Amino acid sequence: MNTENISETETEFLEESTAEIIKNEWEQPEPFEKEVQYQAFPVNSLPKTLSDYLKAVCDFVQVDSSMVALPMLSVLSLCLQGKAVVSYPANAHTESINIYTLTIAQPGERKSGVYKALIKPVTEYQQQYNILHQKEIERYKSKRKFLEHQKQAAMNKTSFERVEQLTDELCELKPVHEMRLICSDTTPEALAAEMDKQNGCMAVMDDEGSVFDVISGLYTNGQGNINLFLKAYDGSSHTIFRRNNDTAITLNAPYLTIGIMTQPQQLLRTMNNPQFMGRGLMQRFLFAFPIGKAGNQNFTSKDISYNIQQAYDELITRLLRIPKADKPVKLTHDKESYNILHDYYDMLQCKMRSGGIFENNTLKEYASKHFGKVLKIAGLLHLCEHTADEPINGDTAINAVQIGLWAENMALKAFDGGAGDDETTKNAKYILRRIKERQYNEITLRELKRNCKGIHNKEAFNEAINLLEDMYYLKCETIRNTIGQPSTICYINPLA
């Protein structure tokens, strides 16, 4: 073929045609991450006061309903944790009603505006309580400081009888602390100390998510400590030792609420933390991925009406005022609630079997805890409209299940980024990443292995290559040389 008179345009056309022919020889690669279809949060599953306020906040701040949903449930959790537990419908087991939530959104999506709107009545209640009890708090601090000073002076004078007397007085002194319902950036040790002062309860709520960096070892040379976060999810006893002295803090029934709003990069770091995943911390969370609205927000927005704001404030204040007894009240179920929850439990079991959406080991661990999450939600919704001595009815159970089904969908998205991958899949992704970084079109198998030093085991490397072949990312072909051993060439799918 004479190419001397071919124009530049014709040359480009021939090159594109040749590339198209090459591409047509390949199958489309199978994606590692399956697309999870977005589902809107079932707003009408909330009690009317909450659904009205959620819609009003969405209109005012101009955000998706999923941006408000989990932080709102977290506020209910901090109000009610430790005050009640939900009985399992079919046995004597109970579930505490505190929840862990994580809402993930890009920067500029007005997370802070949502957080402020939801937390406002909580901070006002806390402030009013501390003002009302300021004299008692200061009197307790002064008396305790005075007795400790006297005790130290008696010890210096070796007046043991006086030391014993002052020790008794210190033990009999009834603590009166400032009310602190929420913290954000805290170490496990500091959190335990504050929970000890706050009758065993605390909420970690933030619109940044920095607490994950702290508990993963930001201030402790990478030595993470998540024990308290695991135990306080269901009120299990926990003891933590102070580093600066020989004393220890024992929390007999700690209850913690976590309500974090953060960015996708933080989620990625968190879900790839072996300690968080391996010990089941992230499997305890509910997740939300709101649709982003930045770039489509209006200059003006509709204000939250006085009546809707007042109704929400009064509800949160009423829940905060419910006294915390030595033993949480046990919430029971009526027959309709029993049947609805029974059906949902069986549905979850089916989803964890082979071929189900939760068959993967990591997702199975999440799903095994998910029924408990639905019970927690049912307890929170119930106490917004009913007293503790009334059983949870069918309507509340249906609403909790609808939120649970929505949360299943969000969990699939949360764990879809590789957190649930087995070792072969992780290795295959690693090899594919190395290929893309170096933009290989073809490479010998031996050279590819040299460039993937993160995989030390030959068998594991070969299994990952086989998976990439099965998913049409590459083809391996053995070339028999006239001299030396045959070599294997890996041809990379240009569609990848």
Image: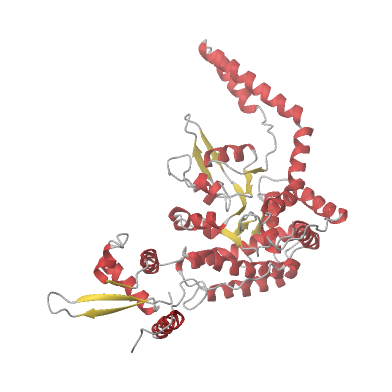
User: Observer-nearest residue: 15 or 28?
Assistant: 15
**In the rendered view of the protein, which quadrant contains the N terminus?**
bottom left
Residue 203 seen from this side:
yes
Q: Quarter-wise, where is residue 377 in the image?
A: bottom right
Q: Position of residue 422 (x, y in %)?
A: 40, 67
Q: Taking 110 as reference, is 476 above or below it?
A: below
Residue 329 seen from this side:
no
Q: Position of residue 91 (x, y in %)?
A: 60, 65
Q: Taking 326 as reference, is 13 above or below it?
A: below
Q: Residue furthest left?
A: 483
User: Observer-nearest residue: 200 or 275?
Assistant: 275
**In the rendered view of the protein, which quadrant contains the C terminus?**
bottom left
Q: Count the marks.
A: 0
Q: Position of residue 300 (x, y in %)?
A: 80, 57
Q: Position of residue 464 (x, y in %)?
A: 34, 71
Q: Is residue 395 left or right of residue 101?
A: right
Q: Quarter-wise, where is residue 47 in the image?
A: bottom right
- Residue at (59% x, 62% y) in the render: 372
- Residue at (39% x, 76% y) in the render: 473
Q: Residue furthest front?
A: 5
- Residue at (23% x, 79% y) in the render: 478
Q: Residue furthest bottom?
A: 1
- Residue at (69% x, 34% y) in the render: 178
Q: Is residue 154 left or right of residue 82?
A: left
User: Observer-nearest residue: 368 or 445?
Assistant: 445
